[in-house]
Image (cartoon, coloured by chain):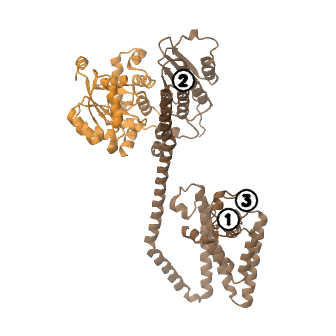
Chain colours: A brown, B orange
Amino acid sequence: MAVGTRACDHFGVSSQLAEEETVTPEVHADRRLRRSGSHKIVAGVAGGLADHLGVPVVWVRGAFAVLTVIGFVGPLSYVLLWVFAAQAPPDERTDEVSAKERQQGIAMLAIAGGLFLVLSMLNGAFAGWIIVPVVVGIGGAALVWREADEAQRRKWRDDARTGVSGFVIGDGRQARIRVAAGVLLVCVGVTLFLFGRISPALVPSVLIAVLATLVGAAVITVPWWLRLVRDLDDERRARIRDQEREEIAAHLHDSVLQTLALIQKQAESPREVVKLARSQERQLRTWLYGPTGYGRGRAAAEGGGEPETVVSGGTLHEAIAVACGEVEDTFDVKVSQVVVGDCPMDVKLTALVQAAREAIVNSAKHSGVGEVSVYAEIEPDTVTVFVRDRGKGFDPEQVPTHRHGLADSIRGRMDRHGGKVRLRTSPGEGTEVQLEMPRKKEAKA
Amino acid sequence: MTTPQDEQRKPVRVFLVDDHALFRAGVRAELAAHGKDVEVVGEAGSVGEAVAGIAHHHPDVVLLDVHMPDGGGAEVLRRVRPANPSVVFLALSVSDAAEDVIAVIRGGARGYVTKTISSQELATSVRRVAEGDAVFSPRLAGFVLDAFSERPGAAPIADPELDLLTPREREVLRLLARGYAYKEIASELFISVKTVETHVSSVLRKTQLSNRYELSRWATDRRLV
């Protein structure tokens, strides 16, 4: 199609009077003739032409109609434009054609067709019999072509995952039925034409000749087809590789380079540097090794067997990592976390993570040491989280009554959701908060 | 096998393998602070250099980076271990990926620590592996627990001796994952530090030899790369 669009470049000159619509500047800059997605009855050629020339669609349809009456030029030019003008990308405008507009267009088409028929029969340019096969054939071709357009749009929608087969024919039963019907109509048209033209005795041999020619052509062009398919595949693969490279470069730029620059600026303040480095390390680690991380894409795709680890809408593992990260950044401590197993989040687990976060914050604020260990284990029935520091510890009896952190944020939260809290601490011994939350046996899936 | 008393006099001879010169210099400096325990006898920046260097120096412990060009730590292990069975490997890496960690452990490393470890802990870990014990960072303990966990739909157990952890081993691993030191684990479970070490070594053996699906999958995942 690239050739086609380039061939249309000369249309793009006189288009500054294009209508003032909610079109992005980008689209204005690229005013090639594109078949319209919004004013579309057959293939959007008239709509596209109208957009392009800045005239109402009706005029263009009228012109096509008039051209149809004059020696069938209208349909011919329509078909050529259909071939050479690319479809407008779907994001432009996708509102449907109004019923009135559609009726109007079809009426015009019918009148023009009828007039053409009457005229051609009157002046004897065509024998009447030829019209039926031609109309049937054209109808079939239009059906198949429309389906190709549809497939292209679907491809745009589905992010170009389908590859070559999806490129040629869209998936879906209806699509296949439509394509088959179109092909059938074309065949019927051709056959009718043949039957009208030649004596019935010759039909078998003509059919055989046609078939033989088709098969011959197919055999001769096999290498070309193969190459086409392979090139398409290669190109797709190269594009994926490029995208990947760009993604990595962009990521490194956005995160690592920026952080390094910041570190250089903050070199005077070791606290800030440590904080920056730590948060950057965490981000990069998540990106590389995290459950949804870059390096995991392949392994996750191959694993497949564990529905529990499928990440959709957040898992406990991620939630804990986020909570730990926040505390790390806010309180300038190292929070090392180990999570065994994983499961999707729910209300109870959210409460658990919030309680754990509060416990980590307490350790960060009061323990007096720079490291907090978090260990979470997800078992079929329960989830257990341990938050531990080796700091100065405290005597639970001595906690002033106005300190609500442990009582409300941790114990209250866990109690409300049916969880348990255990606390192990004494002055000088560090602190460990153990949180246990039963998992509800849900079978939503 | 040397006794701890001998070791007191002779520092553990360590060989560094890491493709980042800067990092090697850093570790060297850190370990120099523990000069009477640990002595760095050589270093290498690639798999080839490492193989030659280890054969030449015969160190007690090799500190091995997981990620390197030409195959990484697993490749070094594969090429060095058959010829030098007495050399002990301790993996030291920034990677947090289970397949990396498990691959070097199954390749024969006696332990795994992350590069953010403090120099004191690193020196202790080096001494510990030199004495024949295993070193599990909390994260490695987590991975192993994960791999040995009983999940619905997990592969059937072929060899219970290797494919299952005893309840005690599981407890020890859990405490390791919670960040407990061996001594703390011992007092928590009312057992001796020596018993803790025995349990950890047994877990290491199972991790290396078990054919559990998760373990072999992690190991092959990395080797194919």
The quarter of the displayed image where residue A16 is located: bottom right
Query: Label 1 neighbourhood size at 10 Å, few (<14), some (14-19), many (20+)?
Result: many
Numbered mark located on residue A21 in the image = 3
Above or below, comparing residue A171 to residue B205 in the picture: below
How far is the residue under mark 1 from the one under mark 2? 58 Å
Q: Which mark is in front, 1 or 3? A: 3
Q: Is A5 positioned to the left or the right of A120 in the image?
A: left
Residue designated by label 2:
A360
Q: Nearer the viewer, residue A187 or A271?
A: A271
Q: Quadrant of the N terminus of chain B?
A: top left
| Amino acid, disc 3 | Glu
Numbered mark located on residue A36 in the image = 1
Q: Nearer the viewer, residue A17 or A134?
A: A17
| Amino acid, disc 1 | Ser
Give the residue drawn at x 72%, y 86%: A120
Q: Is A10 positioned to the left or the right of B120 in the image?
A: right
